[in-house]
Amino acid sequence: MIACAAALALLPHNIAAQPAGGEPVSIGMTYSIPATAFEGERRVTVRLPAGYVEQPEKQFPVVYVIDGGPEQDFPHIAGIAQSRDMNWSFGRFILVGIETVNRRAEISPRVRPEALAEYEESLGATPGGSENFRRFIAKDVKPWVEANFRTDGHNAVMGESLAGLFIMDTLMKQPDLFDDWIAVSPSMWFDDMKLAREAASMIPAAAGGKERIYLTLANEGYRHEEGVERLVDAFRSSAPADWKWAYVPLNDSETHGTIYHTAALDAFRLLYGEPHREYRPAGEMVGGTADPRTDAEQAIFDTECGAYNTISTTPGAAAMGRDRLFYRCLSLDLGPRAREGTLIP
């Protein structure tokens, strides 16, 4: 340790310390809001989409992140949201991170009494706070967001692992709280797979809204995978026609620790994807001067993209027929392929 300290003392000052004159990079703002469910205050962090200030008449959907504190999942999900401003592959939304303080207690459902002591020992917390956390979202978080930002009434919730279990539990018990549900490797093993076992019988009571569900799984194995497969089977057999869902397993390419980035980007593209146009390349790209845009192509380009003139395809298929697709509106199925469901392009 003495040798290390001596070596550090010999370093130039501008290497040993951060240089002066820098400017912080802001990815959002954190607010403390009243939390009646917890008899105090809690923190939420908000990222506004590009153009929010410049378009004062425009309203936006909201994506809520569970475990969304500034030291939790908010910063890296905010980075994915910002990537939209570079690639335009999905629509704009307000991102709201909901911080958890004692997540293993706050967002977990209750467990059977005979297993409570075991869960308390393994979790280091008493599970069963999910109902109260839902109350916090419904009574405190959402009203505060809607009172302070230009929301359009469409709400999504996303989370990974235990937060993913909270999301599926909320879908079954309080489906009117959100419209879109993004569950990344949800812990469906919890409490002897209780939610997974009962999902098929719970779905009819939860029906009534036009829910959209994105479900994915890493290389979990064991009852983690079995529970998710049971949930998928419940969607397959019991989901009403108004529910649109997609199961996108990533167990061949992602682990529990790496899946969130891939899944979040894929979910945003699937749920909020926007039409893409294929443009005729020019110059060195084609090895010479490109052909000018024809009158027919100009007419296609001048037409606004809508459901009636948008073609669903993949990037690979578009490349094969690129010459016939110049300036047309394309809905590209980007990223991993869904294994099954009704939310598949």
Image (cartoon, rainbow, N blue to C red):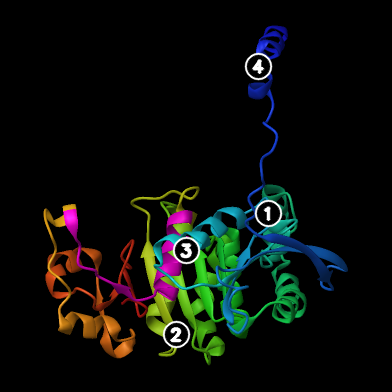
What residue is drawn where x is 59% and y is 82%?
59
What amino acid does circle 4 point to? Pro
Mark 2 element type: loop
Task: State how far apart marks 4 and 2 are (Cα).
Answer: 62 Å
**Numbered disc in front, either 4 or 2:** 4
User: Going from the N terminus, do you reach mark 4 or mark 2 first?
Assistant: 4
Q: Nearer the viewer, residue 287 or 202?
A: 287
What residue is drawn where x is 43% and y is 70%?
90
Q: Which mark is residue 70?
A: 1
Q: Which residue is mark 4?
A: 12
In the image, is residue 345 above or below residue 320? Answer: below
The percent position of residue 61, horizontal first and vertical second, equals 56, 78
The percent position of residue 89, horizontal first and vertical second, equals 39, 67
In the image, is residue 263 above or below residue 198? Answer: above
Where, by quadrant of the figure, is residue 334 drawn?
bottom left
Mark 1 element type: loop
Quadrant, the C terminus: bottom left
Tell whether label 2 touches label 4 (CB within 8 Å).
Answer: no
Q: Which mark is residue 85?
A: 3
Q: Which residue is mark 2?
A: 243
Write down the region rendered in magenta: 261-283
User: Going from the N terminus, do you reach mark 1 or mark 4 first?
Assistant: 4
